[in-house]
Structures are given as structure tokens and as C-alpha cells.
Image (cartoon, rainbow, N blue to C red):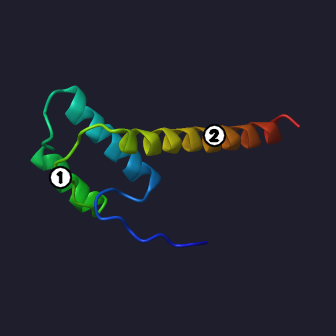
Amino acid sequence: MSTVKAHKNYPNSVYGYADWLYVRRNVIVHGEGSQYDEAVKKRFKDQHRVGLTNCTALSIAFIRPAITFYQDFCAEFLTCLENTFSRDFR
């Protein structure tokens, strides 16, 4: 298994990356501008060991990796479900 160098601005784990995307979405949708809440910054530093930058602007460079992440995640999840349930019904 290969190792990936930890990124300083977003988590490398699936849970962490999904959490990061959701937090960015909340900042944009709920009108908090480009500022993360201090409690969120602290939680990310403690749980995911990354520092959140204050830039939350949407751009194609941000959206494409998010789309790819969720497409790959859903495809893998569905494959796991199919493999799990196909064994039960053989």
C-alpha cells in the first residue's frame, strides 16, 4: 500500500475530506463569507491535523475534485454493497 504525504490545508482521509467539503459548503451557503468559525478551525486542527485557510470562494478548480471525489466514493460504496449482498443471495 502506498503512503500519501499529508496535505496542510485539507485532510487526506475520506471522512476528513467529506467533512472539509461540507464545512466549506456551509460557509458559502449560510452567508458567513470567507471566514470559518473558530470552533470549526480548532476541530479540524485537533481531528484532522490541518489548518483551514480563510479562502472559501468557489471555482472550477475546487468543484472538479469534489465531483470526482463523490463519484469515486459512491462507485466504491456501491461495489462494496453489491459484493456484500451478492454473497448473501448465492
Dot 1 or dot 2, earlier in sequence: 1
Q: Which mark is residue 33?
A: none
Q: Disc 1 to disc 2, how far (Cα)?
A: 31 Å
SS for callout 2: helix
The image shows residue 38 at horizontal and vertical percentages of 10, 48
Residue assigned mark 2 = 75
The image shows residue 56 at horizontal and vertical percentages of 23, 42
Q: Nearer the viewer, residue 46 or 9?
A: 9
Side (left or right) of 39 relative to 45: left
For disc 2, the neighbor class at 10 Å (few under 14, some 14 to 19, many from 20) is: few
Q: Name the quadrant of the N terminus.
A: bottom right
Q: Residue at x 27, y 61 (%)?
A: 50
Q: Residue at x 63, y 44 (%)?
A: 76
68 to 10, vertically: above or below: above
Q: Residue at x 58, y 44 (%)?
A: 72
- Asked where in the image residue 82 lies, by quadrant, the reply is top right
- Amino acid type for the residue under numbered disc 2: Ala
Residue assigned mark 1 = 41
For disc 1, the neighbor class at 10 Å (few under 14, some 14 to 19, many from 20) is: some
- Amino acid type for the residue under numbered disc 1: Lys
